[in-house]
Amino acid sequence: MTTAKHQILIVGGGTAGITVAARELRKGYADVAVIEPSSTHYYQPLWTLVGGGQTKASTTERTESSVMPTKATWIKKAAFAFDPDNNTVTCADGATYEYDVLVVCPGIQLDWNRIDGLEDTLGKDGVSSNYRFDLAPRTWDFIRTTRSGTAVFTMPSGPIKCAGAPQKIAYLASDHWRKEGVLDDIDVHLVVPTPRIFGIPEIADNLDAVIADYGITLHTNSEVTSVEAEGRKVAVKSIGEGGTDTTLPYDVLHVVPHQSAPNWIKSSPLSTGDANGYVDIDKYTMQHVRYPNVFSLGDAGSSPNSKTGAAIRKQAPVVVDNIDSFLKNQPLGAKYHGYASCPLVTSSHAMLLAEFDYSMQMTPSIPLFDPAKPHRAYWYLKKYGLPFLYWNLMLKGLA
Ligand SMILES: Cc1cc2nc3c(=O)[nH]c(=O)nc-3n(C[C@H](O)[C@H](O)[C@H](O)COP(=O)(O)OP(=O)(O)OC[C@H]3O[C@@H](n4cnc5c(N)ncnc54)[C@H](O)[C@@H]3O)c2cc1C
């Protein structure tokens, strides 16, 4: 039985959901509802700086009610199932909502269990991850109290949100240890699944120089498969040419989990049906490939861009324009070309702003600086400028 009907129904009130809701209302659509179970909204990009001791976790959270557009209907529930043939979404409490247009953006699932032995040791004995609000401060506790030994930083294979975050924390930690005069006593390892540290050669060259400067051992084409908490060891497996098969001891371990679509999306008719199971959309129009009144963006969508808030800033206007065209029975004219940006913090005072599109061509917004090199001004942009833009403009549908 249908509980209520809304013209535009949005699943997920995170970065994507709130941005789209605000833009729809500004465009003049009055009946916009957001299904979102959480009372708290997070600005996740700052979790890297929390783990690196540069800011407090409390600066990254606000109440969901403070970001929800006042004219949107907030359905404070978890969505549970889609029936796109009947234009309905069912929530965990059994309530069913009907829509004219559905926007699916409930974020990504962190698959901690895909690394054996990891879940039980998270937050304890030197093991942490900036991918959880509660754990990011633990990362800093472990970094700050380490004076010698071995530190291991890992990145998993497959799409993840903010692919730069696994390496940024290695640089922030090394910078801190250098300032403390203990970097020479810490053996730092960075394990990545890719052939190089970054997909754009000019940027990879400069990051290789940063890595060499800190004395970090980089293991490319490799990933961590298990954690043995008692012996404080991780197993590293080669997944490509020149990869490493070894066991590394650790005193500090920063792990980024494998990621995929939430399980209930994977098993829904909206999924691509492959192992990652994201919402199956056209990568330019963001419209579902089988259900024309369904759109998706953000981390849950199948478009092959780098999964970042920066990408959502460019996707949201495309989704809103194309929904408008769809509702007016016009051809969809707006296109997203894969823009994403990755603010790669290389120390506590420098950052490289990698901006690129589907073709992996660099697309710098600020032509003043060499986009392949770290700059001090970008660090201020990361710590102060981008959070300001996020809370005050992007979530209000103004940028
Ligand atoms: C450590 C870290 C560093 C990052 N650094 C950067 C960076 O420097 N730059 C950058 O641009 N991006 C960065 N990101 C990525 C960025 O935060 C995400 O790409 C972005 O938040 C994704 O937005 P989203 O709306 O798709 O998902 P989210 O913002 O995660 O929102 C998903 C929402 O859906 C809700 N939800 C979940 N399940 C349900 C359900 N069943 N029903 C209804 N709602 C549900 C959740 O409660 C949540 O509010 C970083 C992320 C992390 C973790």
Image: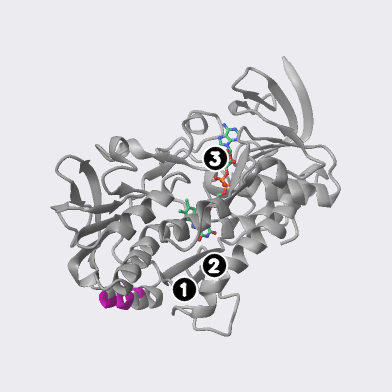
The residues tagged by marks 1 and 2 sit, at their Cα atoms, a distance apart of 8 Å
Q: Is residue 26 left or right of residue 395?
A: right
Of the image marks 3 and 1, the number of the one nearer the N terminus = 3
> In this view of the protein, which residue sits in the foreground, 104 or 118?
118
Label 3: few (<14), some (14–19) or many (≥20) C-alpha neighbours in 10 Å: many
Which corner quadrant holds the C terminus? Answer: bottom right
Reply above or below: 369 against 203.
below
Mark 3, residue position: 279
Mark 2, residue position: 382
| Whether the residue under disc 2 has CB within 8 Å of ligand 1 | yes
Quadrant in which residue 292 is drawn? top right
Give the percent coordinates (x, y) of residue 273: 46, 35
Of the image marks 2 and 3, the number of the one nearer the N terminus = 3
Label 1: few (<14), some (14–19) or many (≥20) C-alpha neighbours in 10 Å: many
At label 3, the amino acid type is Val
Q: Residue at x 48, y 39 (%)?
A: 261
Read off the magenta span: 207-213
Reply above or below: 118 against 96.
below
Quadrant in which residue 113 is drawn? top left
Mark 1, residue position: 351
1 and 2 marks in contact (CB < 8 Å): yes
